[in-house]
Image: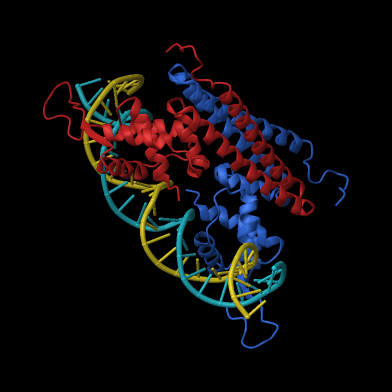
Chain colours: A blue, B red, C yellow, D cyan
DNA sequence: CGTCGATGTATCGCTGCGATACATCGCGGA
DNA sequence: TCCGCGATGTATCGCAGCGATACATCGACG
């Protein structure tokens, strides 16, 4: 499962939790947040927003935007989306989940992005789940490589080597994060942090 | 542009260039080749194969596979796909192209995978195109980060930092490849290579 | 005053992904 | 002996969502 819209639900709720926004702005933030190379399409975003409104998690507000000269002016004003209280509950609920879906590729990024608002126990569970997921993939990959090594030309071999190295580095990064997490996390250690 | 099927066209042609294969096997190889985390669906592969057959690049051969005991046995035998001579020409044509599409994310991987069969000039052009594409992305990313740095919490910051570092490493990798390429490439220096 | 690029909302066609169905094979265990 | 199960294998269907496009307003710049 884990449709694109699932990722979107958490991300949108999270972004709007900080401040109300309209679609265009939301889209830019989402792309930055998710590190999407491929741009997120409006054909994905707007239907998703409509769905969230229909489910009662978002409210649409129309911000007046009239031409200084007046007249009838601003037809088609911008639409500002805002979290309802149900939306806030839903966000908290999603943040509390730490199942397999939380550490699949795309979901992980979003969950991580909101770690500052996430419970420490959940954070750790997600990081560890993600790590074992990656390690598992790594094993499989190494095994496959082993089986076909002698059949490969220099370029293919280099490509595989590079892929393997990236994956290993990813695991090491996670391990450091887990370690930091266990001794208090980067966010809020006992003493208050500056700004 | 650059639909999934475009990537598939080159990849399929390239894999079948080495040896005829049936769909199931082809799919496994494609996934390994493209480093696809998300599995390539048959709903993508089979229609694509049909299209290639219709365009005359592939020929379908049915390999008999009857039960030892005989009988009517092998209904629905496996279908072996094989490159036609037009297919070979098409493959060579695609390998010779070095346009922007060759160094976009997914296309680049496939092109790289067949570098051993690619002309040295084209190889270099693709590598350099890819590099400047990545550098460009990097710049944008850095600028965006600069603009929002102080608004970010520790976790988001760490995520961005990690993304940036990965991208930088990717560029360095490409630079090494370009360098190697300029002094003769890993594949075929003057002397002949074993096997 | 014109126009150009950024901001902004919205929809439509078609690609291709996930799920599923169906069939045969070799294997290990009751 | 034969049953079940997982791997091998071909095939299609629903529908999510991506790319393209249309349309409108804005500020900036010459």
Q: Is residue B60 left or right of residue B122?
A: left
In the image: residue B110, left or right of residue A21:
left
Q: Is residue A56 visible?
A: yes
Does the rendering let one see residue B23?
no
**Compared to C19, does B74 lie above or below?**
above
Q: Residue at coordinates 61% horizontally, 53% vertically from top-left?
A: A31
- Tell me the quarter of the image containing the C terminus of chain B: top left
Question: Which corner quadrant of the image does residue C27 belong to?
Answer: top left
Q: Position of residue C5 (x, y in %)?
A: 62, 62
Residue A123 location (% of width, % of height): 68, 43
Report the front residue among B76 and A124.
B76
What residue is at 67 percent from the left and 81 percent from the top?
Answer: A67
> What residue is rendered at 71% in x and 35% in y?
A178
B115 or B53, which lies in front?
B115
Q: Where is residue B184 shown, x and y percent of the image?
A: 55, 21
Residue most extreme to the left: B71
Q: Is residue D20 above or below residue B189?
A: below
Q: As rendered, which of B112 and B61 lies closer to the eye?
A: B112
Q: Locate residue B32, reporting x and y percent.
A: 45, 31
> In the picture shown, does residue D28 fall above or below A129?
below
The extreme bottom residue here reads: A71
Judged left or right of residue A127, residue B32 is left
Give the residue at x 68% y 51%. Answer: A114
The quarter holding residue A130 reads: top right
C19 vs B160, nearest the viewer: B160
């Amino acid at each position: 499962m884990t449709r694109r819209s699932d990722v979107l639900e958490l991300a949108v709720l999270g972004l709007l939790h900080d401040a109300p926004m309209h679609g265009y702005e939301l889209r830019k933030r989402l792309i930055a947040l998710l590190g999407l190379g491929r741009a997120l399409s409006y054909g994905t975003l707007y239907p998703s927003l409509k769905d969230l409104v229909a489910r009662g998690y978002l409210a649409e507000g129309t911000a007046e935007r009239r031409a200084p000269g007046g007249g009838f002016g601003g037809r088609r004003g911008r639409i500002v989306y805002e979290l309802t209280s149900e939306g806030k509950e839903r966000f908290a609920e999603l943040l509390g989940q730490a199942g397999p879906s939380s550490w699949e590729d795309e979901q992980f990024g979003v969950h991580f992005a909101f770690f500052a608002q996430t419970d420490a126990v959940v954070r750790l569970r997600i990081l560890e789940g993600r790590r074992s997921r990656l390690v598992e993939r790594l094993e499989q990959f190494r095994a496959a490589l082993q089986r076909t090594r002698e059949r490969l030309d220099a370029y293919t071999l280099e490509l595989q080597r590079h892929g393997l190295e990236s994956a290993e580095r990813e695991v090491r990064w996670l391990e450091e994060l887990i370690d930091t997490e266990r001794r208090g996390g980067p966010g809020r250690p006992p003493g208050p942090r500056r700004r």
